[in-house]
C-alpha cells in the first residue's frame, strides 16, 4: 500500500456549475444539496473521502455572486474567500464549453501559490466531443493552471482521474479526520438543508428570492429522531405557495426530505414542517446570524 496523504480541497465556481453534485459524487453521500436553481448552496460544507492511500477533505462553497448585493450574498461570498484561504488545493469548476464574466470573477479570487485544477463539468452535455478541444485550449490561455480535468459529476465520469490529480498535491502524511467521518455538519444542519433542497426543487421557480429553513426541535428518542422545522418565507403570498392546495406541497416536501434524512441518519424520522413569514430575512444581518450564516 502506498503511503497515506491528506489535505483540504476547496470547490469553487460561479453558481450552478455543479459544485455540490461533484462533491456528493466524490463522497458517495448527499452532504450538500443540489437543484437546478442557482444559489442553492449557502454555506461552506465539508465532505470527507477516506480512501486506502489518501484522505480528501473537500470544502463545497456557495456559487460566487456577482449580481445581487444583499447581506446574504455578502455572507456567501465571504465564505468563498475564507475557503480559498484555508486549503491546499483548489478545484475551479466550470461548465463544459461555457466561460463568462462570472467565471472570470471567480478566477480573479484564486490565491497565488495554491495548486488550481480546473474541473470542466457536464461533459455529458456536449454532443460533439470535438467542441471540447478548442474550449480546453481557451481555458489554458486564460491563466496558469496545474491541470485541467473534464468530468461529468452526474454520470460519475472521470472522477478517479480527478482524485489522482488532486492526490499529487495533498501535503500531509497523516489523517486529518477519523476514517468514518464524512462531513463536519450536524444532523440538524443536514435536516434543514434537505428540506430546503425539496423546496427549491419543487417550487424554486415560484419563490423569487428564496426561502430558508429553521429546525426548531431535534430530539433523539432511541432509534427515532423527532424533528420540527419551519420554512421561512419573505411574503404572505409565498406562504400559500409553499403550503399548496390542501397542504399538498408542504406534505410532499416533508415526505421527500424525511426519506433523505432516514437514509443519511440510518434510522426512522418523525418530521413536522411548518411555514412562517419573516419579511426581509435575506437583508437582515442579525437574523442571518441567528439562522447560522456567518
Ligand atoms: N448534465 C449534467 N448536469 C449536471 C452535472 N453536474 C451537475 N448538474 C446539474 O446542474 C445543476 C446545478 O447543480 P449543483 O450541484 O446544485 O450546482 P452548484 O454549482 O453547487 O450550484 P450553487 O450551489 O447554486 O452554486 C443541477 O440541476 C445538477 O443536476 C453534470 O455533470 N451533467
Ligand atoms: Mg452548490
Image: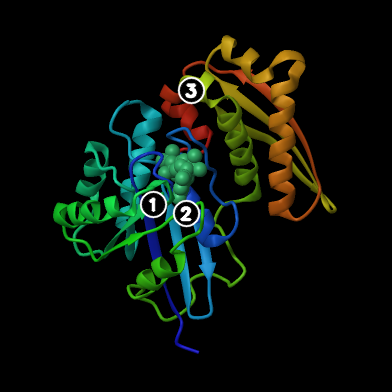
Residue 134 percent coordinates (x, y): 21, 53
Q: Secondary structure at mark 2?
A: loop
Asked if disc 1 is less than 8 Å from ligand 1, the answer is yes
Residue 124 percent coordinates (x, y): 43, 51
131 relative to 30 in the view: left or right: left
Color scheme of the displayed model: rainbow
N-terminal of the two: label 2 or label 1? 1
Marker disc for residue 153: 2
Residue occupied by mark 3: 281
Q: Nearer the viewer, residue 288 or 69?
A: 69
Tag 2–tag 1 contact (CB < 8 Å) = yes
- Residue at 50% over, 61% down: 26
Residue 20 percent coordinates (x, y): 47, 48
- Residue at 72% over, 29% down: 252
CA distance for labels 2 and 1: 7 Å
Asked if disc 2 is less than 8 Å from ligand 1, the answer is yes
Residue occupied by mark 1: 121
10 relative to 200 in the view: left or right: left
CA distance for labels 1 and 3: 33 Å
Q: Nearer the viewer, residue 206 or 173?
A: 206
Mark 3 surroundings within 10 Å by alpha-carbon count, few (fewer than 14), some (14 through 19), many (20 or more): some
For the C terminus, the quadrant is top left
Q: Is residue 113 above or below residue 5?
A: above
- Residue at 37% over, 57% down: 10
Residue 191 in sight in this render: yes
Tag 3–tag 2 contact (CB < 8 Å) = no
In the image as oriented, which residue stretches furthest toward the right? Answer: 222
N-terminal of the two: label 1 or label 3? 1
Q: Nearer the viewer, mark 3 or mark 2?
A: 2
Mark 1 surroundings within 10 Å by alpha-carbon count, few (fewer than 14), some (14 through 19), many (20 or more): many
Q: Is residue 44 above or below residue 180?
A: above
Amino acid at each position: 500500500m502506498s503511503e497515506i496523504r491528506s489535505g483540504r480541497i476547496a470547490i469553487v465556481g460561479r453558481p450552478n456549475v455543479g459544485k455540490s453534485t461533484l462533491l456528493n459524487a466524490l463522497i458517495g453521500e448527499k452532504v450538500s444539496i443540489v437543484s437546478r436553481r442557482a444559489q442553492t448552496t449557502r454555506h461552506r460544507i465539508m465532505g470527507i473521502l477516506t480512501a486506502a492511500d489518501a484522505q480528501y477533505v473537500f470544502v463545497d462553497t456557495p456559487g460566487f455572486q456577482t449580481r445581487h448585493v444583499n447581506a446574504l450574498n455578502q455572507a456567501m461570498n465571504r465564505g468563498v474567500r475564507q475557503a480559498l484561504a484555508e486549503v491546499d488545493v483548489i478545484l475551479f469548476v466550470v461548465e463544459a464549453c461555457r466561460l463568462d464574466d462570472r467565471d472570470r470573477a471567480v478566477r480573479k479570487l484564486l490565491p497565488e501559490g495554491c495548486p488550481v485544477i480546473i474541473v470542466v463539468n457536464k461533459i455529458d452535455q456536449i454532443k460533439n466531443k470535438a467542441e471540447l478541444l478548442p474550449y480546453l485550449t481557451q481555458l489554458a490561455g486564460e491563466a496558469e493552471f496545474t491541470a485541467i480535468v473534464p468530468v461529468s459529476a452526474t454520470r460519475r465520469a472521470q472522477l478517479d482521474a480527478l482524485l489522482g490529480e488532486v492526490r499529487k498535491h495533498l501535503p500531509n502524511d497523516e489523517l486529518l479526520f477519523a476514517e468514518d467521518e464524512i462531513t463536519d455538519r450536524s444532523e440538524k444542519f443536514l435536516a434543514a438543508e434537505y428540506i430546503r433542497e425539496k423546496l427549491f426543487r419543487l417550487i424554486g421557480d415560484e419563490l423569487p428570492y428564496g426561502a430558508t429553513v429553521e429546525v426548531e426541535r431535534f430530539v433523539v428518542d432511541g432509534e427515532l429522531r423527532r424533528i420540527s422545522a419551519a420554512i421561512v418565507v419573505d411574503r404572505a403570498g409565498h406562504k400559500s405557495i409553499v403550503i399548496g392546495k390542501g397542504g399538498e406541497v408542504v406534505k410532499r416536501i416533508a415526505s421527500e426530505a424525511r426519506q433523505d434524512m432516514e437514509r443519511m441518519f440510518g434510522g426512522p424520522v418523525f418530521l413536522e414542517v411548518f411555514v412562517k413569514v419573516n419579511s426581509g430575512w435575506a437583508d437582515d444581518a442579525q437574523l442571518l446570524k441567528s439562522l447560522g450564516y456567518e
